[in-house]
Amino acid sequence: MRQLKISKSITNRSSEALDKYLVEIGREPMITVDEE
């Protein structure tokens, strides 16, 4: 079994996938405090 290597990295925030995700979740209405 290989040794697990953990390294610090920053997510690339200019990715097309992230932009698409944010647009999609932006369409959903916010839930109320009671629903939460």
Image (cartoon, helix red, strand yellow):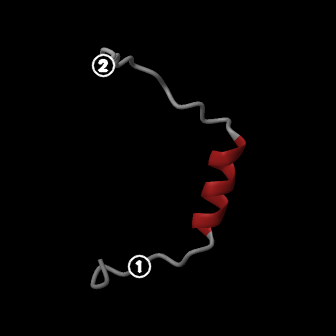
Q: Residue at x 69, y 54 (%)?
A: 20
- 10 Å crowding of disc 1: few (<14), some (14-19), many (20+): few
Quadrant of the drawing holding the N terminus:
top left
Left or right of 2 in this view: 24: right
Pointer 2 residue: 1
Please provide percent x and percent y for residue 11: 52, 31
Where does the image place residue 12, in percent across and percent down from the top left? Answer: 59, 31
Outermost residue, bottom direction?
34
Q: Residue at x 64, y 65 (%)?
A: 24
At label 2, the amino acid type is Met
Q: Left or right: where does residue 12 sit relative to residue 20? A: left
Q: CA distance from mark 2 to mark 1?
A: 45 Å
Residue 18 in the image: above or below residue 6: below
From what the image shows, is residue 9 above or below residue 26?
above
Dot 2 alpha-carbon crowd within 10 angstroms: few under 14, some 14 to 19, many 20 or more: few
Three-letter residue code for mark 1: Ile
- Residue shown at 63% from the left, 72% from the top: 27
Q: Residue 4: give its label.
A: none
Residue topped by disc 1: 31
Residue at image coords 47%, 75%: 30
Q: Earlier in the sequence, mark 2 or mark 1?
A: 2
